[in-house]
Amino acid sequence: MTQELKRKYQKHMLITSMIITVAIFFAGMLFGIGLDKYRIKEVTNILNQNELDMQSYITEQMFFENLDTNECELIKTSIISLTKTISNIGRKLELYGSKTTFENSEFDYLKRKYFISEIRLYNHITSYRKDCGANYDVLLYFYKIDDELSIRQGYILDDLFLERNNDMTTLSFDIEYKEEPLLDIIKQKYNITQSPAIIINGDKTFQGKIINKYEIKEYLNN
Amino acid sequence: MLENIMFIISFISLYLSVFWLNIHYIEKHDIKKTYILTKKPMITFLLPAYNEEKTITRTIQSIINVNYPKNLFEIIIIDDGSKDKTASIVKDLIKQYTNIKIKLLQQKNNGKASALNNGMTKATGEYIAIVDADSRIEPNSIKYLIPHLYEKDVGAVISCIKIENPKTIVERLQNIEYLISTLFRRLFSSLGTLFVTPGVLSLYKKEALDTVGKFDEGNLTEDFEIAMRLQYNGYNIKSEINSITYTKAPNTFKALAKQRIRWNRGFIYNTLKYKDMLIGNKFNILVRFQISLSVIGALMLMLGSAIVTYGVLDKIYTYIIKAITIKSLPRLYDIPKLNEFILSMNIKLMIPLILLTIIGLYFIKKAHNYTDEKMKISPILFMYIIIYPLLLAKYWIIGFIQEYRNAKKEW
């Protein structure tokens, strides 16, 4: 190849390389779309599984009611299992939702389903506490995304949950989420206006400041 | 915001990597090609020296040992006001090698560029080889360089620089860097966009130097400046990978910082001095592309490193805050399952980063192959890929600040 021809060829490389790079990024975008679909599929699958578990739990409850027996230990096992699934969904939604490029609305929809599932679990736990007279604790936690206080309160609740994961459930809600009217009802009932906010066993409410582990423990049954 | 900046940096970096990969593909058969020595012109070796008593003998002896007729070269050592025994060592060597034309010029300490200008007034060679007084040139170095200057438009040719016996971490990091630089300088040379003639060993046409004028005596990087001036005046600069020269490199981080800050300040000053090479049609698109690339590259290195440093500090801050909040040490990292790890990846950043790492490793491997060095997968290689860019970015930032403030020049 002569020097002149080579130089001409090299100049073309400026454009050729741009085309190749754009093609790589386009391929990357397609891969990203595929990955987003897979993320949604994974969260949807767990949500469906959770749905089924909830149905199973309700059927179990009805069954015990018909038999007029009270199998509180069995109910507790189901509640612990439901809590673990819900917390897994929450973790995955947080992990994947922040990485999505093209599926924000789909993740918003899943988030709504997740919040509804959480509220349903809250209802079940409340009934369980009442019917079985159980000392099982349930915390409703309202956070604000990217808020320093909420992040720190989250650390404390994670730590507390690790310490006593078979005796309590923490259900987290985005305080600014507008799509689900049920959340507004809860906020109004407990007069929640600031984040972070914690409602312990539907009774004691804290908001607008960080509550440490020991303060929370004072209001727990266990 | 930061993520978008990183995305832009990744896009540009990937584009440049693809570009150089293409150029390498076109050039790969010619990189090691040697040219035939058809005429043997007179060569003057210019050695500016300041307090070089430890290395000057070895440097001069390496020149004496070059595979080139002894009557066709002369060596001029310019003692730039050394306070040690440099001059007396040279005088002894003159007495010892009576069959070689060796001259000693002595002047008050005035800097390297001034020493070179002084040497040029006494040089009789058709070609001028500038050699640092701590370099060691291989016997065949000159033989490989000369044929490039047969081409009319070529004003200078540079050799492949290797670090002499790298031992410390700093030297070993620079060793990898120098090998990669050699490969890229060869690629720049093929595009006609090489803008450096390192003092370690560069061979010039005397006619070209006479045309463009003296070395800039106030310049922090006179070798970079003369290269820019040669290109500015229409001379091409070539790189020869088979011509090998060894040099002493800074062996401590402090010495490295001093050298790099000086280089970076020199780069900024000289790029601004020749900024009109970027404008208009006097220079071809590849020249303008290369100059822009050097500037953008430095900016991207600084910006990218600042973002990475911020990211690391943010993680540390988060960990500390978490520890303070829960009043005990949290787990450092929860190891995710493989599918969770893949699904939680940020594709916008990860794909370019993975590709860049693969292309980067490919070039490092090729650079070792072309320079006949063995590539070792060692902690130094990982340091070179992960930590060294952060260090270089820091030197760029300091260089920019010093140049902006017009700080005192230190050689």
Image (tube, coloured by chain):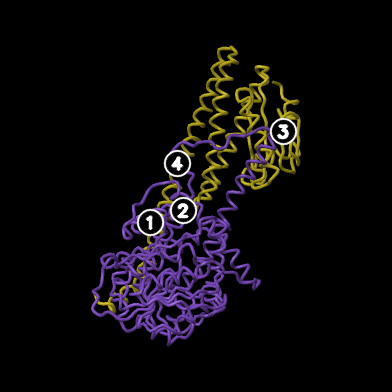
Chain colours: A yellow, B purple
Most distant residue in the bottom direction: B211
Q: Amino acid at mark 3?
A: Ile
The residue that mark 3 highlights is A199
The residue that mark 4 highlights is A41
Circle 4: is it few (<14), some (14-19), or many (20+) Cα within 10 Å?
few
Q: How many marks?
A: 4
The residue that mark 1 highlights is B364
User: CB under 8 Å between callouts 1 and 3?
Assistant: no
- Please indicate whether residue A155 sits to the left or right of residue B263 in the image: right
Marks 1 and 3, how far apart at CA: 58 Å
Q: Chain of mark 4?
A: A
Q: Chain of mark 1?
A: B
User: CB under 8 Å between callouts 2 and 1?
Assistant: yes
Q: Amino acid at mark 4?
A: Lys
Q: Chain of mark 2?
A: B
User: Quadrant where the N terminus of chain A lies?
Assistant: bottom left
Marks 4 and 2, how far apart at CA: 40 Å
Marks 3 and 4, how far apart at CA: 32 Å
Q: Residue at x 43, y 57 (%)?
A: B175
Task: Kindly indicate whether the residues beneath marks 2 and 3 are on one polypeptide chain.
Answer: no
Circle 3: is it few (<14), some (14-19), or many (20+) Cα within 10 Å?
many
